[in-house]
Amino acid sequence: MSPIGPELLRRAAPDLPPAAARLLAECLETDPARRPSAAEAGRRVTALLKVGGWQPRGWSVGRSVGAC
């Protein structure tokens, strides 16, 4: 990810939990080998939704990650 990437993430989504911000930054890596697989990203998003009750704005409770 370019050096400006983390700053853009903080500005675009200041309320994003740190673990979600890390995942998003990893997904935006310019080197495909450094990006998580879709399955891994899905597991991590599911875990984020279960921990602490966080959910993205506009999502309803019970919405499946696969239903995007």
Image: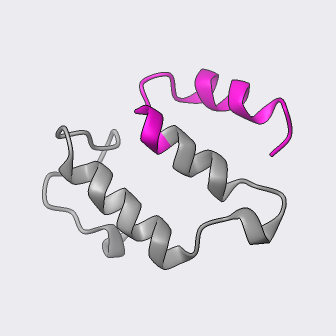
Q: In this view, does 27 lie to the left or right of 18?
A: right
Q: Relative to residue 61, is residue 29 drawn left or right? A: right
In the picture, measured across the screen, residue 17 lies left or right of residue 13, that is left
- x 13%, y 60%: residue: 62
Q: Quadrant of residue 10?
A: top right
Q: What stretch is highlighted in magenta?
A: 1-20
For image coordinates 78% across by 70% down, the residue present is 32
Residue extending furthest front?
34
> Residue extending furthest left?
62
Q: Residue 38, percent across and down?
A: 53, 75
State the image coordinates of residue 2 (x, y, percent, origin top left): 86, 40
Residue ID at (30%, 61%): 46
The quadrant in which residue 54 appears is top left
Residue 36 point in image, percent of width and height: 59, 67
Count the marks: 0
For residue 61, above or below residue 35: above
Position of residue 63 in the picture relative to residue 58 (left or right): left
Is the C terminus in the top left, top right, bottom left or bottom right quadrant?
bottom left
Q: Where is residue 56 in the image (x, y as percent from the top left)?
A: 34, 43
Q: Is residue 10 magenta?
A: yes
Point 40% across, 33% down: residue: 17
Q: Colour scheme in the image? A: one colour
In reply to whether residue 60 is colored magenta, the answer given is no
In the rendered image of this protein, does residue 24 appear above or below residue 57? below
Relative to 54, say whether 30 is above or below.
below
